[in-house]
Image (cartoon, rainbow, N blue to C red):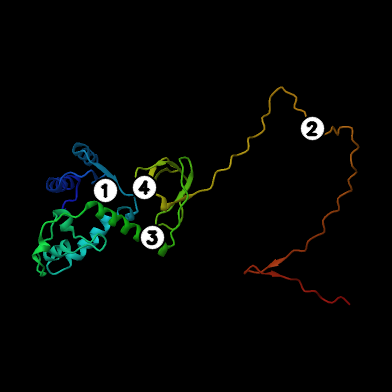
Amino acid sequence: LALAPFSFWQVIQKLKTVFARFGIPEEVVSNNGPQFSSAEFKEFAKQLDFKHCTSSPHHPQGNGQAERAVQVAKKILKQDDPVMALMSYRSTPCSTTGFSSAELLMGRSIRTTLPTLEKNLTPKWPRLTAVKEKDSKGKAKQAYYYNRRNGARPLSALQPGDVVLSKLDHEKSWSLPAVVSSESTTPRSFVIRTHYGAELRQNRRHLQPGPVPQPTPAAPCEASGTDVRSDRPDTSDAVPVCQSEATPPASVPCQTVTRSGRVCKPINRLDL
């Protein structure tokens, strides 16, 4: 679908075309672009009664299916005949589920230039329960090998009121301390309140626990008109300690410093 003037109105019209062909989905996942975060798109989702979920800001892995679809679309557009390449993609079985996208959508294999038997073109719906189970196992296997290859480790849970530091992938240093306001509706996403009052949504990957502010000791209160007694003994009648007269400091010879800052030592002549 071409999106020449990329505005919220064009996005809504294209989605209406897709919904009219395949039906209204229960949930739509998108990024945080201005077209999807506008008030008009929220009203559109309310009218058609579907849930709109956005991925974590600055974390494209949260919407991995869309990112992978973009990669596939770019490869198809680079082919000499993109239409025939699209047909080959739709008729190729997936390595995880064992079915092609055409079989999952229409319940039958489509006829292509590749020779096949007539019985393979007979309509036959796959078992959706088995397909979902294979898909879940495949995703869990990919997540396991990805975490093992990149040394991923579980991060500590954050609670509202915790002090955290934030840093995106392209930033070099951690920001000033912020406070966790609440946990977002999307997984591994939190809403933080910065030191200047703004509320931002960040992924748990971009947050780390910050230093806990230490309480400042309260100054002692001096009540006017009250007699404050000290626990130390009264030394008004004590005999003062005799202090010896301070010896005057010895004269320090003047030091000569060169232009570069080096101190010149005086010549120690032999006094015969």
**Disc 2 residue type (three-letter):** Asp
Q: Which mark is residue 172?
A: none
Q: Nearer the viewer, residue 212 or 82?
A: 82
Q: Is residue 113 above or below residue 124?
A: below
Disc 4 or disc 3, which is closer to the eye?
A: 3
Q: Residue type at mark 3: give it.
A: Tyr
Q: For label 4, count other residues whose C-alpha is less than 10 Å away and answer few (under 14), some (14-19) or many (20+).
A: few
Instruction: Give me the residue at 91% from left, 37% from top.
Output: 239
Sooner in the amino-acid sequence: mark 4 or mark 3: 3
Contact between marks 3 and 2 (CB within 8 A): the answer is no
Q: Give the farthest residue toward the top.
A: 225
Question: Element at badge 1?
Answer: strand
Is tag 2's residue or tag 1's residue first in the polypeptide sequence?
1
The residue under the point 29% across, 47% down is: 54
Mark drawn on residue 231: 2
Dot 3 corresponds to which residue? 144
Q: Is residue 37 above or below residue 238?
A: below
Secondary structure of the residue carrying numbered label 2: loop
Q: Which residue is mark 4?
A: 187
Quadrant including the C terminus? bottom right
Which amino acid, mark 4?
Answer: Pro
The CA span between labels 4 and 1 is 13 Å
Query: In the rendered structure, which amino acid carries the disc numbered 1?
Result: Val
Disc 1 target residue: 29
